[in-house]
Image: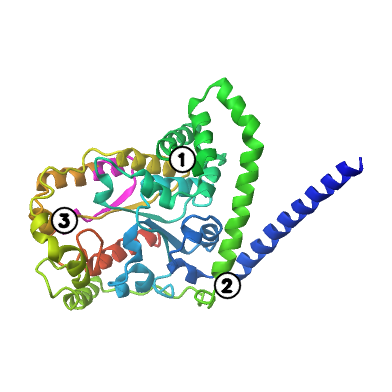
C-alpha cells in the first residue's frame, strides 16, 4: 500500500508540474505576444499553433500561407511584411511557411486551427513547380511535417470524417517508411482502414495519442514563449490601427522596377544577379532544352490542393488563392512548352473557381520583367501586384 501511495504521489507531482508549465507558458505567450511576430519565419510559428491562434485573435491579421517566396530578402522593400509595415493599410501581415510547405502541409495546418479561421482572411500562394509528376517528396514533406498539426487536425470535431480519412491516407503514404514517425503512421493506418476492428484498436490507443498531443501542445507554448522573449523579437509595435492609406499602385510598380534594375544588370533574363551567378551562369548551356518533355498537368499535388480547398469549405473559410506564373523567357529557353503552361494555368483557375473561391491569376505576367526575381520566386514588381490583390481582398467589404 505504501509503495502504491508513493507511485501515485509521484505521478500526481508530475501531473501538477506539467499543468503548471502549461499555465505558465500560456500566460507568457498572452503577455508577450505582439504583431511583430507576423514577419518572423520560424518553426515555432510554422509548425506550432499558439502563435497562429494569437494572430487570428488579433482580428486584423491577414494570414499568408506559402513556401520559399516568403523568405525573400533581395526584394525586401516590396515583400508584404515590409510594404504594409505598421499596419499601413489597416491590417497586419502574418507570414506562414517556408520552402516545400505545399498544399498538404497547409491543409493540415488550417484544419488543426479548429474553427479559429472561420470568416477570417486567408491567402494561399500556389507555385507551378509544386505540380511536378512526382509531387511533394517524402523527404521534403518530413522537413515541414508537424506532429502537433496532425493530431490537432484529427481531433478537430468540426472536420468531416471524409476529410480526416483523406488526410490519413495521404500522410500514411508520406510517412510509412520513417521509423521516427511510427506513431503517426500507425494512427493513419488504423484510421484509413475504417473497420470495426481498426476503430476499436484506435480507441484503445487513444489515451496515448491524447497524452502525446497534450505534451506537444505544451512544448508549442514553451517554444513560442521563448521566441517571443528572445532579443530579436521582444520589441513592441504600435498595435493601434491607423487610417487606410491610398496607394498609387502604378507609382509603386515604377519604384519596384527602378529598384530591380540595379539588382539584375548582369544577365538578359531580369534575374537577380547573385542568383544568376550562383545557379545559372556556369550551367546555362546545359539548361537549354532541359524541360522539353516537362508538364505540370498530372501531379499528386492537385489532390492535395483540392483537399486544402475542401477543408476551407468545411471550415467556412473564403481564401484568396494566388497563382504565381513561371518565368516565361527562361522556360522558353528550357523549351517547356508554352501550351502546357497555359493548360496548367487554366486547370488551376478552373479548380479554384469550382469551389467559388477568389483567385488572383498572374499567368499573364509570365514575360513581364521583374515580376519574378529568379526562375520561380515572386520578385520586386510581382510583390506590388500581390500587395494590391491582398489589399483589395482584405477591404472588399469596406463599402
The correct choice, above or below, for 299 with respect to 267 in the image is above
Give the mark nearer the N terminus: 1 vs 2: 2
Which dot marks residue 229? 2
Discs 1, 2 touching: Cβ within 8 Å: no
| Residue 368 visible to an observer of this rendering | no
Disc nearer the start of the sequence (1/3): 1
Give how far across and how far down residue 361 sits, in percent.
Answer: 24, 53
For the point 57% across and 57% down, the residue is 220
Residue plotted at (36% across, 41% down) = 304
Note whether 186 is above or below 256 in the view shown: above
In this rendering, position of residue 141 left or right of residue 344: right
Estimate the x, y position of residue 194 in percent, counting from the top left.
Answer: 51, 25
**Tag 1 residue:** 314
Question: In the rendered image, is residue 287 in sight?
Answer: yes
> For this view, does 124 lie left or right of residue 185?
left
Marks 2 and 3 close (CB-CB < 8 Å):
no
- Mark 1 near mark 3, Cβ–Cβ under 8 Å? no
Whole-Å distance between the Cαs marked 1 and 2?
Answer: 36 Å
Circle 2 SS class: helix
Please, what secondary structure does the residue beneath circle 3 have?
helix
Decide which of tag 2 and tag 3 comes sooner along the chain: 2
Magenta highlight range? 348-366
Q: Distance between the residues labelled 2 and 3?
A: 44 Å
**In the drawing, does residue 166 fall left or right of residue 4?**
left
- Mark 1 crowd level (few <14, some 14–19, many ≥20, 10 Å Cα): some
- For the point 14% across and 68% down, which residue is it? 270
- Mark 1 secondary-structure assignment: helix
- Residue position for label 3: 364
Indicate the position of residue 91 as horizontal and vertical percent values: 43, 67
Tell me if residue 296 is in the magenta stretch: no
The quadrant of the picture occupied by the C terminus is: bottom left
Amino acid at each position: 500500500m505504501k509503495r502504491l501511495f508513493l507511485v501515485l504521489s509521484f505521478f500526481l507531482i508530475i501531473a501538477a508540474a506539467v499543468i503548471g508549465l502549461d499555465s505558465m507558458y500560456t500566460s507568457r505567450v498572452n503577455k508577450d505576444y505582439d504583431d511583430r511576430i507576423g514577419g518572423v519565419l520560424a518553426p515555432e510559428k510554422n509548425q506550432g499553433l499558439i502563435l497562429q491562434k494569437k494572430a487570428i485573435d488579433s482580428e486584423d491579421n491577414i494570414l499568408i500561407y506559402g513556401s520559399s517566396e516568403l523568405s525573400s530578402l533581395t526584394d525586401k522593400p516590396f515583400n508584404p511584411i515590409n510594404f504594409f509595415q505598421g499596419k499601413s493599410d489597416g491590417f497586419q501581415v502574418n507570414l506562414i511557411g517556408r520552402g516545400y510547405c505545399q498544399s498538404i502541409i497547409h491543409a493540415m495546418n488550417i484544419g488543426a486551427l479548429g474553427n479559429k479561421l472561420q470568416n477570417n482572411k486567408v491567402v494561399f500562394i500556389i507555385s507551378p513547380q509544386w505540380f511536378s509528376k512526382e509531387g511533394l517528396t517524402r523527404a521534403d514533406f518530413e522537413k515541414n511535417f508537424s506532429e502537433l498539426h496532425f493530431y490537432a487536425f484529427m481531433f478537430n470535431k468540426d472536420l468531416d470524417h471524409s476529410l480526416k480519412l483523406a488526410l490519413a491516407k495521404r500522410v500514411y503514404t508520406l510517412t510509412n517508411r520513417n521509423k521516427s514517425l511510427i506513431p503517426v503512421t500507425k494512427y493513419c493506418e488504423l484510421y484509413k482502414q475504417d473497420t470495426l476492428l481498426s476503430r476499436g484498436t484506435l480507441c484503445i490507443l487513444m489515451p496515448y495519442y491524447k497524452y502525446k498531443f497534450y505534451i506537444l501542445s505544451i512544448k508549442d507554448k514553451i517554444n513560442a514563449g521563448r521566441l517571443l522573449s528572445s532579443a530579436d523579437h521582444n520589441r513592441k509595435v504600435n498595435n493601434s490601427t491607423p487610417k487606410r492609406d491610398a496607394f498609387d499602385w502604378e507609382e509603386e510598380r515604377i519604384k519596384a522596377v527602378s529598384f530591380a534594375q540595379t539588382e539584375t544588370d548582369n544577365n538578359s533574363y531580369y534575374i537577380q544577379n547573385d542568383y544568376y551567378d550562383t545557379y545559372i551562369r556556369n550551367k546555362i548551356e546545359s539548361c537549354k532544352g532541359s524541360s522539353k518533355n516537362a508538364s505540370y498537368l498530372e501531379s499528386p499535388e492537385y489532390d492535395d490542393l483540392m483537399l486544402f480547398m475542401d477543408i476551407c469549405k468545411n471550415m467556412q473559410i473564403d481564401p484568396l488563392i494566388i497563382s504565381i506564373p513561371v518565368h516565361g523567357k527562361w522556360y522558353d529557353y528550357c523549351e517547356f512548352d508554352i501550351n502546357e503552361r497555359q493548360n496548367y494555368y487554366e486547370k488551376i483557375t478552373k479548380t479554384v473557381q469550382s469551389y467559388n473561391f477568389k483567385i488572383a491569376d498572374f499567368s499573364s505576367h509570365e514575360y513581364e520583367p521583374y515580376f519574378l526575381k529568379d526562375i520561380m520566386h515572386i520578385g520586386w514588381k510581382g510583390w506590388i501586384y500581390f500587395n494590391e490583390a491582398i489589399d483589395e481582398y482584405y477591404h472588399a467589404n469596406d463599402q
